[in-house]
Image: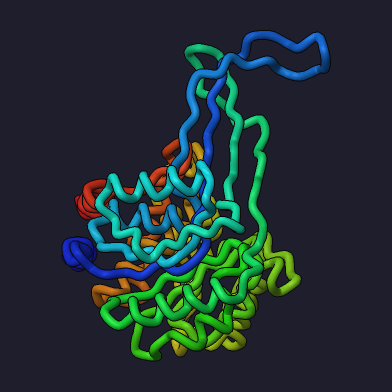
Amino acid sequence: MNGLREIVDRFNGKRVVVFGDLVADVFVYGEIARISREAPVLILNHRETQVVPGGGANAIHNLWALGAHPIPIGLVGDDAEGRQLLQYFSSLGIDITGIAVAKAYRTPSKMRILAGAVHSQRQQIVRLDAGSPLRDDKLRTAMERKLKITLRDADALLVSDYGYALATPETVSRIRRNSLTATIDSRFSLMNFSNLTAATPNEPEVETALDISIGNDAKKLEWAGRTLLRKLKHQAVLITRGKDGMALFERGKKTTHIPIHGSDEVADVTGAGDTVIATFTLALAVGATYYEAAQLANYAGGIVVMKYGTRPVTHRELVEAVDGEAR
């Protein structure tokens, strides 16, 4: 555990470029007033609306909270959500010069409506998504040039692909230096991002990518992990499995199964994948082994799922988790 603590202590100031889809997570909170007479639906008294970084923007937020120096390369639209994301990052001191504002692009957003009684925990009742894939090739090319320049002084590259067509496999393969740690979190195109350092898919993403149902079958899990390693040509694949923890697959090594950190009574899994890849990538950037990085990512994942909404894990929280495990 002392080794893990030393790794976390080296996080400060590491330059991690985050290339990908910047999403606005919108939380609308209301208290239940009554049932509508117009339709069998709840009428809520609006109490609060929060806009926080989601998707790749959440990975950026987590890197900042862990003490790193994240460098965003991405897009927002000329809209309220885009302006709020830029303002949010600016208030944290995060450099936003790598984020382009495109008038013909709508900032991807995920609006969650949460309802509850006055003194109870509000529950999500519906989610409304907005945004469409980038279709401007000139803008994509301009972003690629900016990314290539930014990577010259980077300690690592984190690619966050939520399906909005900015972070394409072709772009990543053209700009990535083989010596640079590069990780990928791809919601829909996992199998298209090859020859990187590592991937951190969740189990449902793996099942979709390989057209397999894993469930509690250890042999299927082993086959899936080894198949991903072989086809993607990564050095490691970390599969997150919810209450079943994580499974780490490395070239030339036996599979390592890591039990979940903390309680399996999860409060909210929103944004947990972003927290995992941010922590995993940052640990690799400071020289951690894949197993050490996976352990720290597991701690961070266990912490964040006990929080409501899209929230990061802080450096202090991760240190306390590592120190607590050592006692």
Q: Is residue 186 above or below residue 322?
A: below
Q: Position of residue 33 (x, y in %)?
A: 63, 9
Tell me if residue 204 can be seen. Answer: yes
- Of residues 67 and 316, the one nearer the viewer is 67
Instruction: Say which of 196 and 246 sits in front.
Output: 196
* Place of residue 296 in the rendered image (x, y in percent of width and height, measured from the top left): 33, 61
Protein image colouring: rainbow
Q: Is residue 320 above or below residue 288?
A: above
Residue occupying image coordinates x 63% and y 80%: 192
The image quarter containing residue 276 is: bottom left
> Foreground residue, 64 or 259?
64
**How many numbered marks have been drawn onto this rendered protein structure?**
0
Q: In the current view of this chain or complex, which residue is farthest to the front?
A: 103
* Image x and y of residue 184, in percent: 49, 72
Q: Which residue is found at the position 51% from the left and 44% from the top?
A: 81
Image-based side of 232 in relation to 42, left or right: left
Q: Is residue 47 above or below residue 76?
A: above
The quadrant of the image that shows the N terminus is bottom left
The spot of residue 3 in percent (x, y) is 19, 68
- Picture residue at 64% right of the left edge, 72% below the top: 189
At 49% from the left and 44% from the top, the residue drawn is: 264
Residue 218 in view here: no
